[in-house]
Amino acid sequence: MKGAVIKYERDNIDTDVILPGPYLKIHDYNELAKHAMEGIDKDFHKKVKPGDFIVAGRNFGCGSSREHAPIALSYSGIKAVLAISFARIFYRNAVDGAFLLPIEIEEDTYKDISEGDQLELETSKNEIRNLTKNKTYKMKPFPELIGKIVAAGGLFNYKQ
Amino acid sequence: MAKTLFEKIWNSHVVVDEGNGRSLLYVDRHLVHEVTSPQAFDGLRMNKRKVRRRDLTFATMDHNVPTTNRSLPIVDQTSATQVKALERNCKEFGIELFGIDSPDQGIVHVIGPELGITLPGTTIVCGDSHTSTHGAFGALAFGIGTSDVEHVLATQCIWIEKPKTFEIRVEGKRKNPHSVTAKDIILSIIKKIGTAGGTGTTFEYRGEAISELSMEQRMTICNMSIEGGARAGLIAPDEKTFDYLRGRRYVPDNYEKLVEYWRENLMTDSNARFDKSFALHVDDIAPQVSWGTNPAMTVDVTGRVPFPDEYAHGNPEEEKAAAKALQYMGLKPGTLVTEIELNRIFIGSCTNSRLEDLIEASKVVKGRKVSPKVRAMIVPGSQHVKKEAEKLGLDAVFKDAGFEWRESGCSMCLGMNPDILAAGERCASTSNRNFEGRQGAGGRTHLVSPVMAAAAAIAGHFVDVREMDLN
């Protein structure tokens, strides 16, 4: 998995800024994607490219249980969010729908990664390679079950 | 072995424990609303699945519905579509719906308890993070996303990792229960433990100050568990719980037998251990006002808007967050909270829109007028709350003072219907989230209790309600 970093230097990025309430009425996922991150970054939709990663601080995705939040990021092309920690419902929604990988990173890693850095993720080795800075970081080990659910394409497929 | 209340409810609902961290849990009640369900129903249709337990599934529409005249069609076409989709889905799948014209319609977390759907010792899920509200009845209740809504519709079960237990003790007896409210207790807890303090845990609220709360006040506390990072919060049921539910429409016929069982079983054993504990004393709690953009950014009404470094206690990330929050909120550090002037007042939401909230707020408002600088509205939590309040003449009290008296729904808590803040408008709100843009893009939210919101409506700025006679 390879892509560029869109970085938000803040904690507590909540579901209302990831996908503001008024857009919860939208049924079409590609339409939802046009409003991803609109609460704090009006240009997100223009700058995001398929395969990009979001890097952020603590408690990413706190707030509402709206699955629209990971869906909007996923349909924007985001393959993984790398954060120091995640709120539980967001983490679960991201995994159960196989929308994106929520990856926990150390604070030093968070600080070292810059906007625009090219990263390569190798989840089987718990490795994040920063191709721009020529460095390798460890991601927090990914629970085996979570990996299986994502690989299967979501909870329903995993259980079948 | 001694067990906590959480462990007792958990153990009695595990269908399969895979031993890999996740268990399959049986769901006793599934509440459904229009926003997080359409894709779940689409999924059922696509895979030719049925709703497994229609009798345990209840639906209402609350997030999108206008709070103005209900005899008129919904103007916003996307809202109308979502509302119609729920009607169609409930009909097709055979689910009971408390629709827009139903006398039972209301915010899902208000009507569940009101109709007796919420019961002690049960598991309750809903595609809404404030499902934690139902924990006030000793039910293990938590919010889920749409994929899980689909899974519960299809199987009546949910895969979930077992949370840790977190005891929150609130000691002492309130000296001024009309001005230091349940909202102030829960905001004080979140201020202390932080918005991620409860991540991966289920709270159990205990102590004298919790026991003395009414059921509606307990719901306010459990409602905001998610704002402290916990998906669920519990309060052990007692005689108040049993009395509240007795005679309500959906309680089972063998209710008194159930009460006997609950009375003997639904409590944390005296020597049970929690994974984490936190305690505070009610004497240390003043009316709270949030100043920032998350519910932990709160101060006493007697305080000042903090300087970022003072808020951060040496944590540079927190300092940056506070500076950003102040900028968004348009507040200068050092400003007295009582000098913050408001444009809007919102009394409503699943946190604070029940009859008791409206009664308490009306005591502040009675015989007074809303400040000419302020636009204020009351949005009752349900049609039943609205009707009961009208029987008590509260609608007249509020309308005479200059408040708008609306139909029930989520309304300005999350800005999905036309009730929103304009950019830059400052609102004293009894809701649960002061996130950026939550009540409308650029809108500024201050979280407070109903009496604090009512007093701010009259004065045009925050006031310490302890100075008023509310008895």
Image (spheres, rainbow, N blue to C red):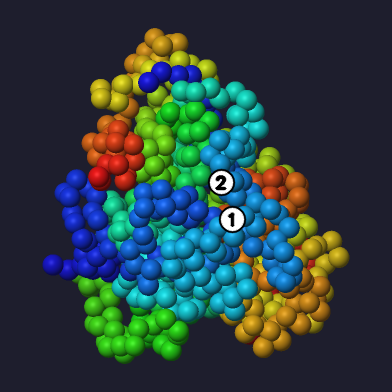
**Residue B215 visible:** no
On screen, residue B349 versus residue B151, left or right, reads right
Examine the rendered structure and indicate whether residue B229 appears above or below residue B141. Answer: above
Residue B267: image quadrant is bottom left
Query: Which residue is label 2 attached to?
Result: A27
Residue B340, image x and y in percent? 74, 55
Res A76 visible = yes
Indicate the chain on which mark 1 is placed: B
Q: Nearer the viewer, residue B311 or A123?
A: A123
Amino acid at circle 2: His
> Along the line of sight, which residue is nearer the eye, B141 or A27?
A27
* Coordinates of residue B97 in the picture (x, y in percent): 51, 70
Q: Tell me the residue at 70%/70% (across/down).
A: B70
Measure the alpha-carbon separation of dots 2 and 1: 8 Å
Q: Quadrant of residue B10?
A: bottom left
Residue B31, image x and y in percent?
44, 65
Using the image, determine if residue B206 lies above or below residue B300: below
Instruction: Give the percent coordinates (x, y) of residue B338.
Output: 72, 60
SS class, disc 1: helix
SS for tag 2? loop
Q: Is residue B202 left or right of residue B359?
A: left
What residue appears at the point 41 percent right and 74 percent down from the top-left corner? Answer: B118
Density class for disc 1 (Cα within 10 Å; few <14, some 14-19, many ≥20) is: many
- Label 1, on which residue? B82
- Chain letter of mark 2 equals A
Q: Are marks 2 and 1 in contact (CB under 8 Å)?
A: yes
Residue at the right extreme of this rendering: B372
Name the residue located 30 percent from the left edge and 25 percent from the top edge: A123
- In the displayed structure, B65 sits above or below B325; it is below
